[in-house]
Image (tube, coloured by chain):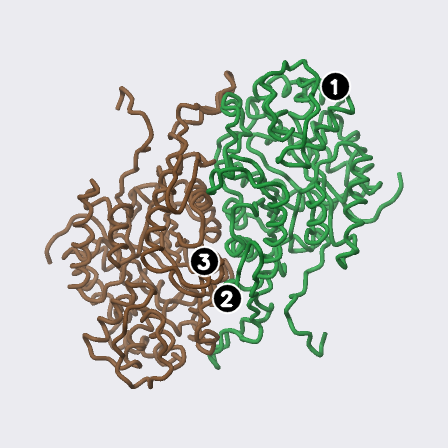
Chain colours: A green, B brown
Amino acid sequence: MARRDGYLKLGAFYHEGGHHVAAWRHEQSDIGEGVESLVSFAKKAEAAKFDAVFLADGVSVRLKYPEAASHKAHSGVRQFEPITLLSALATVTDRIGLVATASTSFSDPYNLARQFASLDHLSHGRAGWNLVTSGDLESAYNFGHDKPIDHASRYERAEEFADVVLGLWDSWDDDAFLRDRQSGQYFDPAKLHPLAHKGRHFSVKGPLNIPRSPQGHPVVVQAGSSEPGKELAARTAELIFTAQQTLEEAVAFYADVKGRLAKYGRLPEDLKILPGVNAVIGATEAEAKEKFEELQSLIDTRVGLALVSEHLGGVDLRGYSPDDPVPVLEETNGSKSRQVLVSELARRENLTIRQLYLRIAGARGHWQLVGTPEQIADQLEERFINYGADGFNVMPPLLPGSLDDFIALVLPELRRRNLFRTEYEGRTLRENLGLRRPPNRFAQATAAE
Amino acid sequence: MARRDGYLKLGAFYHEGGHHVAAWRHEQSDIGEGVESLVSFAKKAEAAKFDAVFLADGVSVRLKYPEAASHKAHSGVRQFEPITLLSALATVTDRIGLVATASTSFSDPYNLARQFASLDHLSHGRAGWNLVTSGDLESAYNFGHDKPIDHASRYERAEEFADVVLGLWDSWDDDAFLRDRQSGQYFDPAKLHPLAHKGRHFSVKGPLNIPRSPQGHPVVVQAGSSEPGKELAARTAELIFTAQQTLEEAVAFYADVKGRLAKYGRLPEDLKILPGVNAVIGATEAEAKEKFEELQSLIDTRVGLALVSEHLGGVDLRGYSPDDPVPVLEETNGSKSRQVLVSELARRENLTIRQLYLRIAGARGHWQLVGTPEQIADQLEERFINYGADGFNVMPPLLPGSLDDFIALVLPELRRRNLFRTEYEGRTLRENLGLRRPPNRFAQATAAE
């Protein structure tokens, strides 16, 4: 195959029991075991030199279909909130990045800026913030709203939210805190930069009451695939976690987003693109398929229907039979990126509702691979060298087994091809991802610079 | 002395370098050393069987007097945000409680309920939430306000905030999550309780997307000494962290608050009262005084004036000489409890501004002790047996030295008097504090109960 310099970047995306929607029913899945399961997951991923642990989030229980909700592990209930969880992992790991999802729709930039800066301090420079917006009704109901926030409004808020957070993270120069015992000067007031932000959604004077963090600021991660999502990412993100089914889609998305960077004065290498990948791995192709079918057989029909509904933006499919073709839908207010991807998949392959839920149950809209370590490495390599990805967010279908398989079987194959590191390049998440440490926007240039 | 059953409850209250306002200038203080200092503090306190680590918080940098702000370590800048910090400590400790301060004025009950519940899960039942309100202008400016929130409004919000958080913590019965692989039922919908709260400040449907936590809910801690503060504590708090200078004040406050519990159907033992204590310990009285004077001599005059101003609710003292008597002041919008205590102290002893700042610099409004281990134990015992306290929040003036002294010198003396434990009584913070595990308010009584 053709050459491309550098290694793949790999995220280790946790979900209780595994990412397959029926994983929790598998007798080998690790469920409800407390923080010890997470500590084990993070330590394994670190020993294998993954770039980061990745955690999703949401601010509601998805109860639209109560029967389905009570029969799945993916209804939005989590034992741990991601920021607190990653803080707990910070003191029991040394090198792996810690990326938590947090929504801009129902939180406050001052509080969020502080918590992620704190996580960056706690972890000595390993924090990342996956910025998302929340468009579902049930989340809105938990925060004083009586209807969901429409797509345009929540992206407008997200744009301003990101600006405020990034501004607050530059409240202090890196060397603002002198702590000079002799003179009694604790900080240098000339190195303090209040923000004085006044915008449509937020008015925030600053400064943040936390020193600038080891990475300059935590790595900014985003997932949006809509137009405003891609534009926000091009302007502010340093890592994109995305969902792409085919090589063509992946290459087109990659070129699209990277092509938007120049107008913001950014270089293509300032943003890394990591599609999700869900890999069921077997010593033979037959074994892999058998493993996959075992998980598929555990899917409850109610859960399958609800899953399709959710991935199509909340449309009600209860009047349909699972053997009906997937209906063509009007645009809704939910997550655009998932709707587009899942509708595309159904249309392209002319799927019934059941066929669609069987297709998305494993990877839930992400890229599903089932095969031998060599087959999987081939696929990952193809996407990488063709500039469809800078790496992947690995979503093990069954935990802990599928992570163990990926580490034991796929990583050695990637290393044999010189596609993945054997040791961390740096101490911080930024250094391992190959992202520069941002200068403080407010810092005075000095003669030495 | 007279007898009183049970042990003192002891909190270990951290501040970078120590609680004395000039501690950071002392050559033996540990400053700017990262999370390792905190890990060491928590592990020492746990080995010594303290009930909990306690962290204060604020959401602004106190810049009203910029010259003073830049010369002190108590201007509101902290390397870590408390919830993330205690989460980090949860995985490197086993038994000690973890109490973080978080304001109800500028955060959201759904987010806060989740994070503290998560901390309770992470720590296997060791979380506590110190509920405070924020009345300062600089905090208001960071959250879209153009003036401080007045005292009555912020207590009204705090009352409703507490109700929402407590309600969300009961979203699920303890046994709601079945995770029954055979039937495919993940949770029992009959054991799910949406909150459907609609009030003046908040509208929150619920349920919380996190299972009920190990302690039923985190221990609720409060600090308010104003009328609405005491009433809120009597209704909802399980632990009070308070500031009392004299035995008479302490006994009166204790009787006052405990006397308010009955009308809320609560027993005196449902609420523990822990005044802060700042102890400078020496082998002899002369050595203790020398240690104290060494810290006092490090106080910058600008810092002293700003400290008095801040403790009097933000009044401007820049027109005064440090040798003027403390002026009699009109009531302001700041923290009532501190204003009352500090004004009382100045009036009682007819202090000048300098004398007042020297008096409050060590303990910052809390009880200051300087003496031998026996003298300090005598004072603590006197307050305990006379029902002025159920224990104390220990605020070491210099860290790590003053905590080391307290553990090495005062705790053995307290144990000799059978006033403090030699081993933890339970696994959770609640068990060690002697607080019952609250039943879920929504759970159906069953025949077995």
Mark number for residue B38? 3
Decide: few, some or many residues near mark 2? Use Cα within 10 Å; few <14, some 14-19, many ≥20.
Answer: some
Q: Quadrant of the N terminus of chain A?
A: top right
Label 1: which secondary element? helix
Report which residue position mark 1 lands on.
A286
* Mark 2 belongs to chain: B
Mark 3 in CB contact with mark 2 (< 8 angstroms): no
Three-letter amino acid code of the residue under disc 1: Ala
Q: In this image, B64 relative to A340: left or right?
A: left
Mark number for residue B32? 2
Three-letter amino acid code of the residue under disc 2: Gly
* Mark 3 belongs to chain: B
Towards the viewer: B279 or A105:
A105
Q: Quadrant of the C terminus of chain A?
A: bottom right
Q: Is residue A246 above or below residue B285?
A: above
Three-letter amino acid code of the residue under disc 3: Leu
